[in-house]
Each structure stands twice: as C-alpha cells, then as structure tokens.
Amino acid sequence: MKILVDANRIVAALMKQSTTRDILLDEAFEFVTPDYSISEVEEHRDELQQRLKLTREEFDVLLALLFERITVLPKYAYNDLINECKEAIEDIDDVPYLAACLASKCLGIWSHDPHVLKQKKVSVFTNINMLRMSKSAKSD
C-alpha cells in the first residue's frame, strides 16, 4: 500500500521508539513524501537534536534510517497540482502533501494535522487507521 507520510509523522518517528516508528518501519507499506518534508524536518533540526540529546552525526544516522523507508518525491513531480490543491486546504504549508499524494497516486496521507484531516481531496489515515490496514494486509 502506497501512503504519503507528512513531516509530523516523520518527526514523531524520530522522537522515540513508538507506534509511529513501528508503522514507518512496517513493510506492509510503501511510503512517499514530498521533498518539502525534508526542509520541514531540517527547520527543526537543532531543537530535535537537543530534545533527543543526539550529536549531529547521530541525528543524521537516525534520519537516514527512517528515510530508507520513504521515497522522496521531487517538486517537479507534483508541481503541476499545486494550484489545484491550494483551494482544498486551509494551511498553505500542507499543499505540497496533497499535491504529492495525488501525483504519486497514493492511497492517502498519513497525518494527524487538523488541516489535513479537514480537507476532502484525499483520504487521511491516523495511526489507528494505519495499524488496522497493516493488520489486514498481514492477514491476507
């Protein structure tokens, strides 16, 4: 199942061993994210490193491990859909996620962001949905 993952889920997976990290490492899913999510994570790098008490190198290794499971979609692959998606969501920062989800033909977006949850253009999955989908994929 191809699912688009937003930066908040990536950050949550970075923060600690958790359900979010388990889902991100679950091979039942193929994850995609727009290149924009990398800049969102980088924007909070210093804060995250401090909270995690990691050196730059340790943080880079953890981030690289997570991104081994995520295909990064370059802006040119979803840029044609940006204008269409601007009207579908309140927060302009979430537009690349909608556009990338449509461009990559994902089943939906894995997000807990309230703006993403409100939009009606694509399906949105929370951790609970993802766990249910994983369980059903494994029982097939």
Image (cartoon, rainbow, N blue to C red):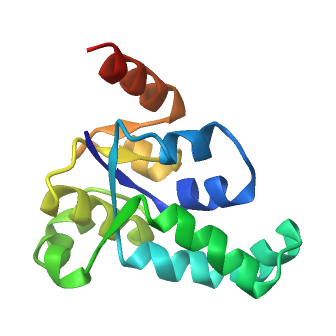
Task: Please name whichever residue, 85 or 50, is drawn nearer the observer in this view of the structure.
Answer: 50
Name which quarter of the figure residue 43 lies in: bottom right
- Up/down of 12 relative to 42, above or below: above
Residue name at image x 65 percent, y 68 percent: 62
Position in image of residue 109 (x %, y %): 35, 48
Residue name at image x 42 percent, y 42 percent: 117
Q: Is residue 135 left or right of residue 65?
A: left
Residue name at image x 69 percent, y 81 percent: 45
- The quarter in which the N terminus is drawn is top left
- Up/down of 122 relative to 52, above or below: above
Position in image of residue 53 (x %, y %): 89, 72
Q: Residue lying furthest left in this view?
A: 80
Q: Is residue 75 left or right of residue 48?
A: left
Task: Please name whichever residue, 124 or 53, is drawn nearer the observer in this view of the structure.
Answer: 53
Residue name at image x 39 percent, y 62 percent: 70
Instruction: Report whether residue 33 is seen.
Output: yes
Position in image of residue 140 (x %, y %): 25, 15
